[in-house]
Structures are given as C-alpha cells and as structure tokens.
Amino acid sequence: MAAVRPRGPNILVTGTPGTGKTTVSEHLAQLTGLKYINVGQLATDLNLFDGYDNELQCPIIDEDRVIDEMEDDLSAGGNIVDYHGCEFFPERWFDIIFVLRTDNSILYDRLENRGYRGQKLESNLQCEIFQTILDEARESYKTEIVHELQSNTSEQLEQNIEQVQMWINQWKAQHGQ
Ligand code: DAT
C-alpha cells in the first residue's frame, strides 16, 4: 500500500557531486514550497560524521544518526532530499528518485572550479563514468521510480525543473492535494 504523505511527495535528487543536485533542488523547493533537505549540509550542521573517506577525501556521514534526524520530516512527506548517494535511506521514504547525469568534460570543469584536484577529482569523475549512483539507485529502489536526467546545460536545467514540477502536480492531483 502506498504511504500516506500529508505534506506531499518525497523526492530524492541524487547523482555524482557537481551534477547539479543543489541547483535543481533549491529551485524546485522555491517553486513548489516543498522542504529542501541537503543531507551533506545537515550532517555538517549537526556534526553527524563517522570517519573519513581517504579516496573521496571527504568525511563519512553517520548514516543511522542522519536517518534518525530526517525521519519525522520524511514521514510527514513534502521533501526534496539532495545527496550524492541513496542506498542507505529507507526505501519507503521516496516516491520518486531523479539521478542527475553530466558529461565528463563538463563535470571535470565544474569540479575543478569547485577546487577538486588529483585523486578527489579522479574518483568523482570515475563515479560518473561508471554510473555508480544510477546503478545504486536501480539496485536500492523499484526501477520504475528511478529516472535519469541529463544535466549539462542551463536549458536542460530548466527542462528538468519543469519535468519534476509536472510530476509533483500529477502526484498531488492523484492524492487529492
Ligand atoms: P551538486 O549539488 O550536484 O554538487 P551543484 O548544484 O552545486 O551540484 O552544481 C555544480 C555547478 O554546476 C554549479 O556551479 C551550478 C552548475 N550547474 C548545475 N547544473 C547545471 C546545468 N544543468 N547546466 C549548467 N550548469 C549547471
């Protein structure tokens, strides 16, 4: 049976760092009134870390504590969640998953602009080349709720925002909201 979500659908926007999750999610939250949850930022704000990943050169989030922190919001519904991973979230949380994808050369420039260098830059590019996050999403959720979106250009950004908005409106109509 479908979950009851009084505040609207829960959407996960995932993908390799630099593919545009924050950009698209913040726009969507503004346009729709859904709550934006940036999981990396939440972990930083509340210091929910559990070690350090030497390969990706970033702290490892404490998944159990992050889930505890998010549970009330996700149970109520109406959230846009932004994170570069997806397999540790409870499957029941999400109504739809969007996996953003970016061509290598474009992603390289975005990550370099962000100050990524060496191993950190390489590991993130490999993550995109091997479609690691898309595979993770397909393995962790029903494939029919996992959608790949190309995120190379500002035109595609606009199209993606429009597509997700349309989906939200449809969901609300179907659920009498
Ligand atoms: P993420 O949250 O996935 O790490 P971001 O939203 O911070 O990514 O975007 C990284 C950079 O790329 C940022 O400068 C905005 C830009 N960007 C994002 N999506 C884009 C798109 N579809 N077209 C052009 N630039 C984009």
Image (cartoon, rainbow, N blue to C red):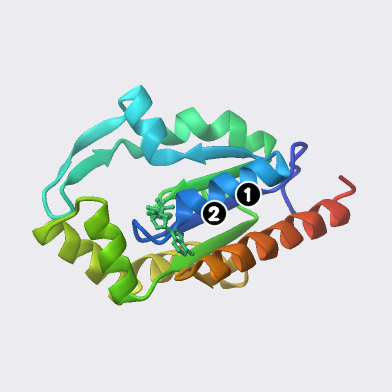
**Can residue 72 be seen?**
yes
Whether ligand 1 has any atom under 8 Å from the Cβ at mark 2 is answered as yes
Name the residue at the right extreme.
176
Q: Amino acid at mark 2?
A: Val
Q: Which residue is mark 2?
A: 24
Q: Nearer the viewer, residue 92 or 177?
A: 177
Q: Residues within 10 Å of mark 1 (few under 14, many from 20)?
A: many
Please state if 87 lies on the left or on the right of 57 as rendered.
right
Query: In terms of image quarters, where does ligand 1 lie?
Result: bottom left
Please state if 79 lies on the left or on the right of 138 as rendered.
right
- The residue lying at 22 percent from left, 59 percent from top is 112
Q: Nearer the viewer, residue 93 or 171?
A: 171
Q: Measured from the top left, where is residue 86 in percent x and y? A: 43, 54
Q: Which residue is mark 1?
A: 28
Q: Are marks 2 and 1 in contact (CB under 8 Å)?
A: yes
Please state if 134 lies on the left or on the right of 80 as rendered.
left
Name the image quarter holding the N terminus: bottom right
Q: Amino acid at mark 1?
A: Leu
Q: Nearer the viewer, residue 138 or 83?
A: 83
- The residue lying at 41 percent from left, 32 percent from top is 42
Q: Measured from the top left, where is residue 34 in percent x and y? A: 67, 40
Q: Measured from the top left, where is residue 158 in percent x and y? A: 61, 63
- The residue lying at 76 percent from left, 43 percent from top is 4
Q: Secondary structure at mark 2?
A: helix
Residue 66 in the image: above or below residue 32: above
